[in-house]
Image: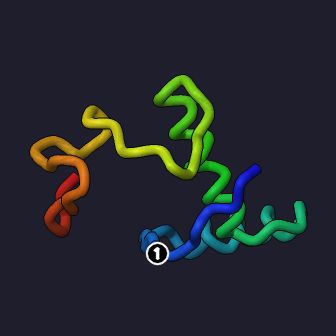
Amino acid sequence: MELEERTARLTILIDPRKKRFFERLCAEEDATPSQVVRRLIRSYIEERTGRPWTPAEETPRSAAPRGVSPGRKAAPGRR
């Protein structure tokens, strides 16, 4: 498996109790929360596209948020 560049930050808001529970589950499998979230994101991408993820993959036009063309960021608060 090719190593990916880890330069982008994803900030999410989550219930503090759910966060503690998630961190405890991650620790039980000797994984960091970041590793588990990256694995979940990869699985989601592969499920949605129907093929294995490759780091060089371009964003498909259909995966861009409505009204935002690939390569452009959505306005804050926009999906």
Work out whether residue 37 or residue 59 is closer to the camera in this orientation and state it. 59
Work out whether residue 69 or residue 74 is closer to the camera in this orientation and state it. 69
The picture places residue 33, in percent across and down from the top left corner, at 69, 69
Say above or below: 72 vs 60.
below
Sort mark 1 into few (<14), some (14-19) or many (20+) by Cα contacts within 10 Å: few
The picture places residue 63, in percent across and down from the top left corner, at 32, 38
Looking at the image, which residue is at 51% across and 76% down? 7
What sort of colour scheme is used for the picture? Answer: rainbow
- Amino acid identity at mark 1: Arg
Q: Count numbered badges in the picture.
A: 1
Direction from residue 23 to residue 27 in the image, left or right: right
- Quadrant in the picture for residue 47: top right
Direction from residue 74 to residue 35 in the image, left or right: right
| Local SS, label 1 | loop
Direction from residue 44 to residue 22 in the image, left or right: right
Looking at the image, which residue is at 18% across and 58% down? 78
Say above or below: 20 vs 60.
below
- Quadrant in the picture for residue 58: top left
The picture places residue 45, in percent across and down from the top left corner, at 51, 39
Looking at the image, which residue is at 76% across and 50% down? 1
Direction from residue 63 to residue 44 in the image, left or right: right
Looking at the image, which residue is at 57% across and 72% down? 6
- Quadrant in the picture for residue 21: bottom right
Residue furthest toward the top?
A: 50
Residue furthest toward the left?
A: 67
Q: Name the residue under label 1.
A: 9
Work out whether residue 70 or residue 19 is closer to the camera in this orientation and state it. 70
Work out whether residue 72 or residue 19 is closer to the camera in this orientation and state it. 72
